[in-house]
Image (cartoon, rainbow, N blue to C red):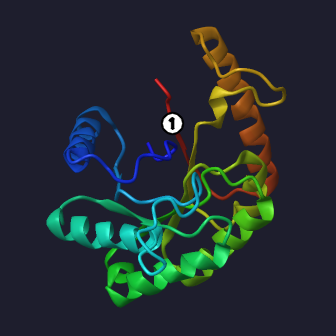
Amino acid sequence: MFRNPHVKDYPPDHIRNLLNVYFRAKLLSRAKQIYVTVPDYPDDYHPRSLWLSDSVTNIERTVDNVLKYTEQYKWVPWLIPVQGWNRKPESVLRSVKLYREHGIIDKFDYFGIGNLCVEPDVEIIFRTCKLLRNELRDKKIHVFGLKLPALKYVYHLIDSFDSMAWTRPVFARGHSCKTTKERIEYFEEWLKRYEKIVKKSGNKSLELFINNDK
């Protein structure tokens, strides 16, 4: 939703809709655990567009949401988003510092890097993941929207990632999948590339979440 530069906040019914999806997932899924991501404020789509000021940036707004929703809905298994500033890996340390001050690090076991969704630079991706892993050595780390070429460099630093990249051709430029046939073909090609990277990277178990655009 924040790809639209005119959108500055979540709609009033967002958290209710989010929890409804969680309840449906619990009914339909065989997964042992289902996590819910606290609504966060990314800076990578339109840098600084979600800042309220130089002191209340997307990071502080995200932390405020985390404090509010984890307190209101203590029974929800939250995944805590770690936001940062666009193309500034060290900024995630600002998030960690605030979470430590409020006791969030001690309360939760799963944290997600939220400022890399559209980042193509492998060095920035690696530095961000490395910084967070150094800070959260005993926690699980997820990366939202990880680019596949970066996987081999951060494979040993993370526990899971998600992707919608499979909806587009892997080795050639072209349109996003429009038919069931194309969806199958694109996914199979993407999966082959993913498995090749994982095989070369080692035997560590890595969870993969495939985002469906339909």
- Disc 1, SS: loop
Q: Residue 22: x percent and y percent? A: 26, 44
Question: Which of 121/41 is in front?
Answer: 41
Image label count: 1
With 86 as the anchor, is 196 left or right in this view?
right
Residue pointed to by mark 1: 211
Question: Which of 179/133 is in front?
Answer: 179
Q: Residue drawn at (36%, 90%), measured in percent from left and top? A: 101
Q: Residue 79: x percent and y percent? A: 38, 61
Q: Residue 171: x percent and y percent? A: 83, 30
Question: Which of 157/122 is in front?
Answer: 122
Report which quarter residue 123 is drawn in: bottom right
Q: Residue drawn at (50%, 47%), measured in percent from left and top? A: 5
How busy is the neighbourhood of tag 1: few (under 14 within 10 Å), some, or many (20 plus)? few
- Name the image quarter holding the N terminus: top left
Question: Which of 109/68 is in front?
Answer: 68
